[in-house]
Image: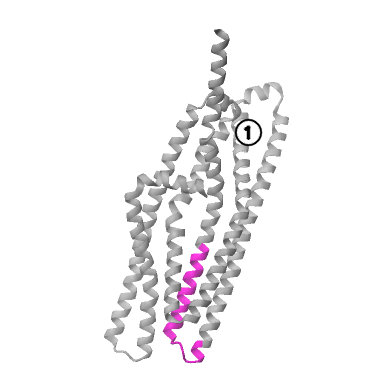
Amino acid sequence: MSTTVSLLITYLKPQRGKAVVLAALVLTGIGLQLGAPRLMQSLIDASRAGTEGDALTVLAAAFLAAVLAKQIVTPITTWISDNVGWSAMNALRADLTLHLLRLDLGFHNSKTPGELIERTDGDISTMANFFSQFVVRVAGNILLMAGALIVLWLQDARLGAALTGFAAISLVVLARLHRIGVPYFKAGRRAVAQTIAFIEERIAGTEDLRGNGGLPFTLGQMRTLTTADGNARRKANTVARVTQGSWELLLAGGLALAFTLGALFITAGTMTLGALYLVFAYTSLISANLMQITEQLDDFQRASANIERTAELLNTKEPYRRRSAVASRRRAGGRL
């Protein structure tokens, strides 16, 4: 986690101007998402109370305006978020490439070109999705979920308490599942890099392989690598599907809880039809946020593995240079 935070700070800091605009757009989107169901609640209750048509028209127009504004804000937010994320990751890719070029031959002899290409391009491309969507789909959705729960608490403390417990339990379960998945995604990325490195090297040495009759042996090695690659990916995908299935189970429980409590309160006469709509809308909103957070945790699992692999590359500078310096001093001493 400290490595992730460090990379976020280092490479997002130059984007702080855009980050401020992005934060404002995220907060605007949250306000619109929370406000639209409240307007619909007022419209439903006002129509059932026999309110005049002009007032209903104003409420309906306000609801449509909120929905339309949300549809305008969302793509702008996504565009700026992607721009910030990819700009940061392109800067990281450039720094990592320059860093690798400065390392001595001892390092490059221990790594294949295909593996280094995968780690400087494939790993960072995967990380870019995480960096570009982190604020919008994690920080923003957590704030949105908190806002929905606050409104539900104000609407009815019993509903607020029940759905807060549902959200807390869901987040704890998903967080625990996330911790399990990181090693599997790291192993999957490692297997991909090894396979790509093998293919790159064998294609480059096609003439030698054909001249020495090494094609059957190469195909056998390829079969072994692709089998290991498939096994690693299958394990990682299984962990991801378990996370998704857990979310679906939690979602069903949350909706059942909301509808049961809403039915009881309407039967008792302590809740209006508009308030029931608000509960349904906010429960769906909370569930959708949990779904997006789950998806982002899936991306975070992959990004964490890639960040660790990238950090390993960045931290190889001193050991190789130190050994090179020692060898140089020994050679100089021998000549003296």
Residue 11 percent location from the top left of the image: 41, 44
Magenta span: predominant SS is helix
* Percent coordinates x, y for residue 134 in the rendering: 45, 54
Residue ID at (39%, 56%): 78
Residue at mark 1: 198
**Does dot 1 land on a helix, a strand or a loop?**
helix
Is 218 magenta? The answer is: no
Indicate whether 135 appears above or below 219: below
Which quadrant, please, contains the C terminus? top right
On the rendered structure, is 272 left or right of 57? right
Q: Position of residue 48 (x, y in %)?
A: 38, 89
Q: In the figure, is residue 82 to the left or right of 264?
A: left
Q: Which of 1/105 is in front?
A: 1
Q: Nearer the viewer, residue 274 or 322?
A: 322
Check residue 271 for magenta coloring: yes
Residue positioned 52% across, 50% down in the render: 1
Q: Residue at x 49, y 80 (%)?
A: 159
Q: Is residue 99 above or below residue 252?
A: above
Quadrant in which residue 216 is drawn: top right
**Residue 82 placement (x, y as % from top left):** 40, 51
Near-viewer residue (66 or 34): 34
- Binning the other alpha carbons within 10 Å of mark 1 as few (below 14), some (14 to 19) or many (20 upward) gives many
Q: Residue at x 60, y 46 (%)?
A: 186
Query: Quick one: which residue is furthest to the top in this view?
Result: 336
Number of dots carrying numbers: 1
Q: Residue furthest left?
A: 54
Residue 306's place in the image compared with 101, above or below, is below
Q: Amino acid at mark 1?
A: Phe
Range of residues picked out in magenta? 265-291
